[in-house]
Amino acid sequence: MVIIKSIFFLSLFTINDIPDGVKELFSYHYDRNQFDQEIAKRSLDLFVESFDLDHSYFLWSEVKPMLSPSGKWIDFTRKSYSNGSFDSFIEIQKIFEQAIERRITFENEVIRDLLDKPYKEVKKIAELRFDPYPANFAQLKTKIKSEAAFFALKESLMGKYEYEKVKKKLYSYFQKKQREKELEYRQRGLSMEEHYFSIHVLKAIAASMDAHTRFFSPDEKREMRQALSKDFSGIGVVLRDSMDGLVIQRVVDNSPASHAGIQAKDVITKIDGQDISNLYFREAIELLSGRNYTRVRLEIQREGQKFEVSLNRAPILSPESQAQVTLFPFGTGAIAAIRLDGFFDNDQGNSAAQQLESAIVSIQKEQELKAVILDLRKNTGGFLTQAARVCSIFTGGGPIVLARYGNGQISVVKEKLTKPLFDGPLIILISRLSASASEIVAQTLKEYGVAIIVGDSNSYGKGSMQYQTITSDEPYCYAVTIAKYYTISGASVQLKGVASDIHVPTELSQIPIGEQYLKYPLGYDTLAQNFKHLSLSSKDELGQIFSFYQKQASSSVLRVWIPQLRALSEKRGLRADVADPALFEAQEIARDLVMYLNGGKEKKSL
């Protein structure tokens, strides 16, 4: 996600808050500014889908009237939006509540049947496949039965349980997880019911505008804040829910948990003396959470033995908040692979650009830095300001990206001109998951002529910018698409992504990941297509930037070697006997590039 920073607090919402929230989104959005028939249709579709994502609550005959391209439900929705009653969504909410009660009845029935069946038959039931929506109640029951069987077998495999001995407990856990999914839709007092209903309506309308406009609940806001800043607090564990308690999947190095001797596969069964077996996962996490330097007592189960540990919560340095460096010795120095998993900024000195700068400076102090591989394969974006700063590390500043708003206005994101921190051979490693801000970095450095792109055939394909209130204290929490972005050539990555110069497939190369697979993505265009609609001043500024681009591209000493590098890479093929084949090939390409730039004089060190 490309995000422009802004400032937000959330209390309980009411239906009266929905029109103001939607109006605020419309006021910012790139090209959606009214609740028309298309938005009404999309909102209904998303409202229903968000509740029944697995299509295991409704029959097709029940949802077809709500999801049909035209009809009374769409008209009803537009009218109820106009008068502020939101009666169409209220009616659907009532249907949700009835579907939950029906599902519970069906679950009890099919689980009784599953408990009487042998393992082999349960396995066959778990492997059944279905059409999106069941046509009748018999199909709905069979689908629920298959879900329950698949869940129980998967959990028994993950937990290394003997199915026949724990099957009752497995199916009880299945039902517990289902009820947790339904929590926000089940009645729990009028104020909370209205709060969650309002959030669900706002979510549906926001998501109907385009693929990246989103409204966030208070819980999601907290999680998003942490994700953007990579700033966490707690005991330093990654958890998975299980029928026995909270399973510790990973312990963060140098964290309170690691110092207390907690290990992966340990199970937390009590928190501050409270048994968590009957708590939902999110409730247990809330109990475990707390302010920094406060004490928490945990009962831990390890290989059948239980013991108690006490530890203080503390700030946690996430691995994703650090530039991860791998050095490959080469000649009289080294090639550095530097991995950035996000363009984060916690406003306290820890940011992606700062981490990258520190890594490069640290290496340069120790030895000659022959080449850099910037690994963005798992980088799904972050702050635009950080993307721009990362670019300037290799370009020495200048224009980075152009934003075109819905009204046609153009703004240019620039970095102050200075000397590049590193101006040697640069390889950028991408995958189909590399998105948004990482695509800005890859395409911009490619167009500056200072980088060669290696990886999957193309990146994710997100070419839009969002304004967000996640990091603020305003009453509504959202990210809304406000502009499309273009690189200094006037090109867009929207839907198409950044094209690799040398195709080196990653483990994600065959997975359908990308903007094109999302609902309601913006279309593709280029600035050249919109040039005649721009103001005279914008045309003049863009003309200068395009000329600058042509000069940069024509003077590149790296990119002239792409045909030879590609031929060598294709001849080698991808190594299957190494831990990370794509990274291994990227450093081989970097070695070849250094050799070419040095006239073949550099000696390879293996």
Image (spheres, helix red, strand yellow):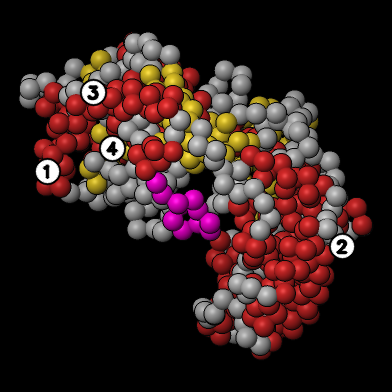
Q: Earlier in the sequence, mark 4 or mark 2?
A: 2
What residue type is disc 3 on? Lys
Image mark for residue 271 = none
Residue where numbered disc 3 is placed: 551
Q: Secondary structure at mark 1?
A: helix
Inspect the magenta stretch and tell me whether residue 525 lies in it. Answer: yes
Q: Nearer the viewer, residue 605 or 15?
A: 15
Local secondary structure at mark 2: loop
Closest to the observer, 395 or 512: 395
Q: Position of residue 84 (x, y in %)?
A: 83, 56
**In terms of sequence position, does the residue under pointer 2 or pointer 1 come before the other?**
2
Tags 1 and 3 touching, CB below 8 Å: no
Q: Where's residue 105, x and y in %? A: 78, 80
- As measured in the structure, the alpha-carbon distance from the residue carrying label 4 to the one carrying label 2 is 53 Å
> Is residue 241 depicted above or below 102 in this figure?
above
Q: How far apart in space, not on screen, are marks 2 and 3 (Cα)?
A: 64 Å
Residue at the disc numbered 4: 453
Q: Position of residue 546 (x, y in %)?
A: 31, 28
Cα distance between the residues tagged 4 and 3:
20 Å
Q: Which residue is mark 2?
A: 187
Q: Residues within 10 Å of mark 2 (few under 14, many from 20)?
A: some
Badge 4 amino acid: Ile
Question: If the image is split into quadrants, where does the C terminus sit?
Answer: top left
Report the span colored magenta.
515-526
Q: Nearer the viewer, residue 600 or 278?
A: 600
Q: Position of residue 597 (x, y in %)?
A: 13, 23
In this rendering, which labeled residue sits more in front, label 2 or label 3?
3
